Image (cartoon, rainbow, N blue to C red):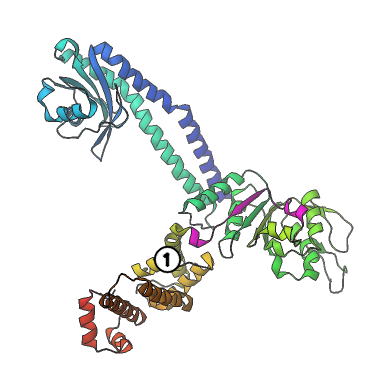
Amino acid sequence: MASHNNISQKLIDLKMRLEQVNRSWTLGDHEGLLRFYVFIIPRVMDAERCSIFVFEPGTDRIWLKCGTGLEERQLMPPREDSIVGQAISSGRWVIANGLETSPYHADLASKTKYKTRNVLCAPIRSRTKEGVTGAIEVLNKRGGNPFTDEEGNLLQEVADHLSAALENIVLSQEILEVTGLLNHEIDRIMHNDIKIIAKSRVMQNIINTVRSLSASPVNVLIHGESGTGKELIARLIHKSSDRRDKPFVTVNCASIPENLMESEFFGYEKGAFTGAVGIRRGRFEEADGGTLFLDEIRDLPLAMQPKFLRVLQEGEGSRLGSNTVRHYDLRIISATNRDLRQEVASGQFREDLFYRIFSVDIYIPPLRERREDIIPMAVFFLNSVSKRFRKKTAGFCPEVLDFFQEYCWPGNVRQLLHEVERLVALTREEEPVSLMYCSPELQSWKNSRTITDLRNNDALTLAAKVRDLEIRCIKDALEKTGGNKLQSSKMLGITRPGLDKKMKRYNIKVH
């Protein structure tokens, strides 16, 4: 555990240092320097204009970084058939005169409203590695004169000095990418026992909120439908905080009988009541220094709520059968699948406790409102369940993922996991996971959806509706029989050759 924390802390320190270095480089200063070059070089070279280009090795992409009277990326000259591309490819300065008749520069003139007569272009050579990072170009020598070799050598000197500024701009962007990767790696290492799929924007925002809460000890309320992952988010908040090495104690308020609630949370001394044959610490003591997660906080009895309020306000309480006041240092994270404000309005939850149990609330939307998470989550569950079951499948059939994407998932993440466990358990080794083993709930929804689609599709002719129904029936039969054509034909009440003909006619293939 110590080495785990050391690695996490070193990654955090490295990320912070990279961010500080990136800020100290002041990217705007480097870009300001480039703009200064664009302003001053035409005066030094007695030319009309100047442009600076960036080259992306491995992609052959060249794009304008800044130029006289031009916006960034307004020009993207080709690697071939351009003066800039020629200078970058050869690594030497290039002079080109008499460009009034050049098709390429005529096309540029139509875009930029500027006619190019002659060009001097020098490559910007990397100082840190072999190759070229860009090019600097001056256009139209004043007085109609051509550029000279002496001016070519001068511009190359300028380009060599310019390389430092250009590489700093590129490196700044790379550091931002590295910092982003480190953020991901820190999350992976610190929370390697907590897997949260956050493909959707709303879940990414929740993860960002959790990250923001890590430095403060505020109490949190997590609300959302059953099965959305409220406890997972609570654990992530705990693991992200400085209490991560302290206990995370979970209590489901709905599962404790009301007459045992006080002893469960506060504990008791020996002889405090009949059956108290020993000393027992309560949940508040167990969570001291760490986090107490109160699941289904709505079901906390009204009689207990004033005692909870004292713990939250004063941070203290006593075991049953004892007058000794014990002090608690803990964070409260609560969860509910109901609207606590409505419970307060109806008198089922104390208003003063409502305003004490949390400073920040997090709403986790149901799975049907964040469909971007369904497929990544299903694939993750398939891999983890396969390892747990020690069973190898050939992955999901495409129609399974399509179906998962469309289904409403009333049981949310918990139901999706349950469905994947069922599919892995029933699918034969090395075979693809198909719809044939889906639960009755999903099969019923699928069948009702098929009938509804056929009824609602008024645009189809009778022949088209029959064709659509035949295709669906054949596919369903093949899924249920694992692709066995003989069994499928018997299920459909047709001959095996008849099934083959229909499959050929409708281009249906067995996966």
Q: Quadrant of residue 475?
A: bottom left
Within the magenta stretch, is there residue 354? yes
Q: Position of residue 131 (x, y in %)?
A: 25, 32
Q: Is residue 228 above or below residue 175?
A: below
Which residue carries the number 1 mark?
406
Q: Quadrant of residue 86?
A: top left
Q: Is residue 87 visible?
A: no
At x 46% / y 40%, what residue is drawn?
179
In the displayed structure, does residue 4 sit left or right of residue 154? right
Q: Secondary structure at mark 1?
A: helix
Within the magenta stretch, is there residue 344? no
In the displayed structure, does residue 240 sit left or right of residue 386? right
Q: Is residue 240 visible?
A: yes
Q: Position of residue 426 (x, y in %)?
A: 43, 78
Q: Quadrant of residue 435?
A: bottom left
Q: Which of these two is toward me, 100 or 260? A: 100
In the displayed structure, does residue 487 sit left or right of residue 241? left
What count of labels does the image hold?
1
In the displayed structure, does residue 155 sit left or right of residue 443? left
At x 54% / y 53%, what residue is drawn?
191
Identity, as a three-letter code, of the amino acid under mark 1: Glu
Q: Which of these two is toward me, 332 or 366? A: 366
At x 82% / y 69%, what residue is drawn?
278
Q: Position of residue 374 (x, y in %)?
A: 45, 62
At x 88% / y 64%, what residue is drawn?
321
Range of magenta residues: 350-369
For the C terminus, give its image quadrant: bottom left
